[in-house]
Amino acid sequence: MVTNSGTAAGDGRFRPLNEPSPAAVEATPRGAPKAMLWRGSYQRVVAVHDTWRIDDEWWRDEIARRYFVVELESGRRVTIFHDLVRDLWYQQTYEAPKAAAPMGRKRAG
Amino acid sequence: MDLLRLYRPAVEAVSPGHAHLDIRGLAEMAHMEDEAYLRDLQESAVNATGLPLSLAAAETVFAAHAAATVRAQGAVLVHEGQARAFLSRLPVEVLPVSPVMHQRLRLFGLERLGQVAELTLSAMQAQFGREGARAWELANGRDDARIVPKPEEVRISEEVDLPAPAALSEPLIAGTRALLQRALERGELKGHSLRRLDWRLGLESGEQLTRRCVFREPTDDPARMLFALQPKIERLQLPAAAVSVGVTLSGLCSEYGHQANLWQVGPRRYKELLEAVEQLNARVGGPQVFRIVEVQGWSRIPERQLGMVAFGP
């Protein structure tokens, strides 16, 4: 059991970081991004530098995303993903995960 | 460009004498037919500039560009749904591809866009690569290009005439300090930092000396700006006394600041910091200062890797 730290729980003491933000993306029929709304104007995607997919938590709130690192016609690189469950597009900074989680502790008793 | 921007802010300067303008909805607003509006726009531009002008409007940027290219003067409207038919008659030289590709298209007997459109995409791509695929799309009236107006650069200038001609650096520095403070109080710069400072000195002889400072880190602090500029002023060898000083600030960007490391202060400062944070939270309501902690650094889901925890005991 986790001991009670005595710290009051309340709104706002923990906030998530790097939440995806909705993006307006036009895609080809095959699902590749071809234009994106960036700072008020649509910019064409001139190159897709990388793409990968993550599938996780199928046992609860399924996450299925296809990520793209795209280069816009202004030269800016942006990471976006297509939420395959909800069919929506988002923008999000992506960092490769660190090494695997530490092994769980042995159970008592 | 300035004349076109009176009609619509979305103006893209493509090259000297060539611009793209988004006019969707303007004819309706003027209660005119599209063709009449286009003719009116063309006449107004010719009257204002005195230059020969060809103007074309179409559903896509390329179709409008091609129509304006093949017509020396006047206004052309390519009606909705007719872009492909219109383009089919145009020579391949209107395609925005390399001159080498124009030559190769001719060598293959492809002289009109209609001939290019009749081929398959795979054939064009196999023979001409990415340029061929683009040419095929454009010849078929498929163009997803958008008009991308160049963002306007904000430049703030302030100038002052010196009360008396000055040959020493001290009055110039004092004048510059006052100008910087005045410029940074302008509303356009609120919440922004700046990257570039252009300083100019008007001399009695009519000459003007200029110096430029580009800041390594954007700043909105007049003291830091003057610190960077002052050595340049002090090194000046003036051929004549100075009568005016001016500054121009540009290179606006978002607010920029140094984040000191909150977690590496001594115990006394840490206690002061805690008290200050608690006071801030009480004034605003709810936690205001957070620190980033690793939550599931190994997770492939980015928003699970890190989180923010309220700073406090």
Image (spheres, coloured by chain):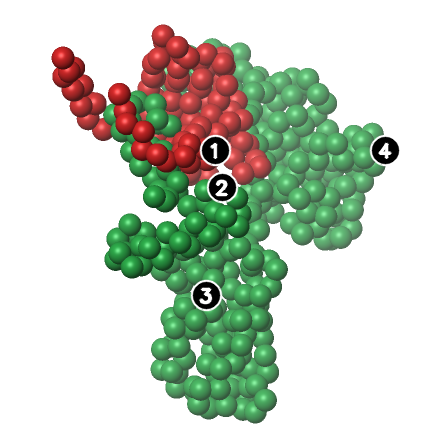
Chain colours: A red, B green
Viewer-nearest of labels 4 and 3?
3
Element under disc 2: loop
Q: Do badges 4 and 2 share one subunit?
A: yes
Question: x, y percentage for residue B132?
Answer: 43, 22
Residue type marked 2? Gly
How far, Cα to Cα, is label 4 from label 1?
A: 54 Å
In this rendering, the answer to whether B1 lies above or below A67 is: below
Callouts 4 and 3 on one subunit: yes
**Res B69 label:** none
Q: State the CA–CA distance, disc 3 to disc 2.
A: 30 Å
> Pointer 1 and pointer 3: residues touching (CB < 8 Å)?
no
Label 1 CA crowd tier, 10 Å (few <14, some 14–19, many 20+): few
Q: Nearer the viewer, residue B177 or B149?
A: B177
The quadrant of the picture occupied by the N terminus of chain A is: top left
Tell if the residue under mark 4 belongs to the same chain as the one under mark 1: no
Q: Quadrant of the C terminus of chain A?
A: top left
Is residue B252 rendered to the left or right of residue B126? right
Horizontally, residue B57 falls left or right of residue B32, namely left
The residue identified by callout 2 is B286
Q: Mark 4 = which residue?
A: B31
Badge 1 sits on which subunit? A
Which comes before the other along the chain, label 4 or label 2?
4
The residue under label 3 is B221
Identify the element where label 4 is drawn: loop
* Subunit of label 4: B
Which one is earlier in the sequence, the residue at label 4 or at label 3?
Answer: 4
Residue located 56% across and 17% down the image: B140
Query: What residue sits right under mark 1 in the picture?
Result: A11
Amino acid type at circle 1 is: Asp
Q: Residue at x 46, y 45 (%)?
A: B288
Q: Amino acid at mark 3?
A: Asp
